[in-house]
Image (cartoon, rainbow, N blue to C red):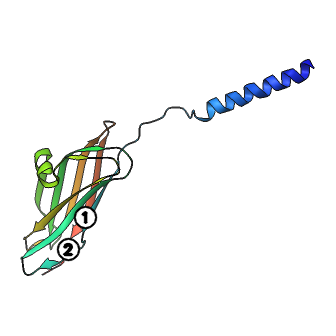
Amino acid sequence: MKKQKRIWISLLLSFILIIFLSGCSGVIEPKTAKINVFFNPNPVPYNSETGEWLFNLILSESNGIGVTLTSLRFDSYNQQEQLFFIQILYEEDIIGWFGSNYLPAFSALQASIYHTSTVLKYDILTAQGIDDNDNLIEATGRVDYLPK
């Protein structure tokens, strides 16, 4: 009877240990946000009535962590693919474009943008921010402009 009791106690302790340790995988690192950069449409057609290339910039978060956007940098390239203009938007400008500089988890911000430059071929946008877990977040996207 003692041997049978020991086996049951050993099995019970092993079961408890397995359940307890199954959730422990060592150090758990906090999740980081993921920003996605979209342009709609892309490539952007020229509107001959307005003389503009008009599109929507959409920033979304897809990893479940909110982000405070700190800057948006547009690197503009000409037809020869040379960098010819840099525009950096900081928090006040971001709020002006989107109504907020905070991108909630699993959410999106959208702004309508237009260009009138005839030498522009494409822009590279770099979005930077700090997520709710204090991680530096950066994402890039490219928008192309169709010729007139």
Q: Position of residue 46 (x, y in %)?
A: 14, 78
The residue under the point 7% across, 81% down is 49
The reply to whether residue 122 is in sight is no
User: Label 1: few (<14), some or many (≥20) within 10 Å?
Assistant: some
Res 142 label = 1
Q: Position of residue 144 (x, y in %)?
A: 21, 71
The answer to whether residue 120 is above or below residue 141 is: below
- Is 12 placed left or right of 6 in the picture? left
Residue picked out by circle 2: 44
Q: Secondary structure at mark 2?
A: loop
The answer to whether residue 106 is above or below residue 50 is: above
Most extreme residue toward the top, as rendered?
2
Mark 2 vs mark 1: in front: 2
- Is 103 placed left or right of 47 in the picture? right
The answer to whether residue 135 is above or below residue 49 is: above
Res 103 label = none
Q: Secondary structure at mark 1?
A: strand
Q: Position of residue 7 (x, y in %)?
A: 85, 25
Q: Amino acid at mark 1?
A: Arg
Q: CA distance from mark 2 to mark 1?
A: 11 Å
Q: Position of residue 67 (x, y in %)?
A: 28, 44
The answer to whether residue 37 is above or below residue 71 is: below
Query: What is the total number of numbered labels drawn onto the structure image?
Result: 2
Q: Earlier in the sequence, mark 2 or mark 1?
A: 2
